[in-house]
Image (spheres, rainbow, N blue to C red):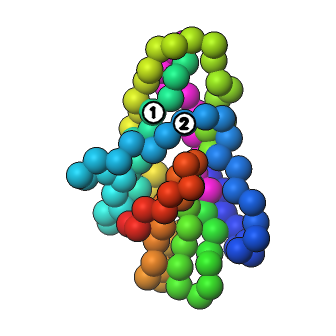
Amino acid sequence: MGCSTGADDMSIDFGYEYEVIVSEDRPSLTDGELVVEVGYDGCDPAHEFELNLRAVGSDAMEMWLVKLTEDEECEDRFEQLNIYDIEEEIEGASERVLLTPDGGEIDL
């Protein structure tokens, strides 16, 4: 898991192509546990994702996933549930935002 206190102009690398699946109960952040469902095309399931975080100001935290597994030349569609324990990293942050590859921001 990466963590930085980057400036607002830091460009964000989301890695290879994926989407965050938004539903009534996901993404969620409960008791320091971030739950994010993602979708991607490929040949095989279980692609690797890394969670990155950065402090914004004194009490806000932005987070995003980076897809580390390269895009594959298959048309199968997969959905994957990723769970991260980030209780220590977000301590003291009153605003928590998940950034998505399509430019979206999800308040957690």
Image: magenta residue range: 43-52
Determine if the magenta segment contains residue 50: yes
Query: Label 2 to label 1, Cα distance in Å?
Result: 6 Å
Is any part of residue 33 visible from this angle? no
Q: Considering the image in quadrants, where does the C terminus appear?
A: bottom left
Q: Is residue 13 left or right of residue 34?
A: right
Looking at the picture, does residue 21 appear above or below residue 25? above
Which residue was labeled with disc 1?
39
**Magenta part, dominant SS:** loop
Q: Residues within 10 Å of mark 2 (few under 14, many from 20)?
A: many
Q: Percent position (x, y) of residue 2?
A: 67, 56
Q: Percent position (x, y) of residue 82?
A: 43, 42
Residue occupying image coordinates x 75% and y 60%: 11
What element does badge 2 sit on?
loop
Residue occupying image coordinates x 71% and y 74%: 8
Mark positioned earlier in the residue sequence (2 or 1): 2
| Residue nearest the viewer, comparing 89 with 68 | 68
Residue occupying image coordinates x 39% and y 42%: 21
Q: Percent position (x, y) of residue 46?
A: 50, 25
In the picture, residue 69 is in which quadrant? top right
Looking at the picture, does residue 26 appear above or below residue 91? above
| Residue nearest the viewer, comparing 50 with 77 | 77
What element does badge 1 sit on?
strand
Q: At label 2, which amino acid type do we have? A: Tyr
Q: Are marks 2 and 1 in contact (CB under 8 Å)?
A: yes
Residue 49, labelled with which disc? none
Residue occupying image coordinates x 41% and y 56%: 34
Which residue was labeled with disc 2?
18
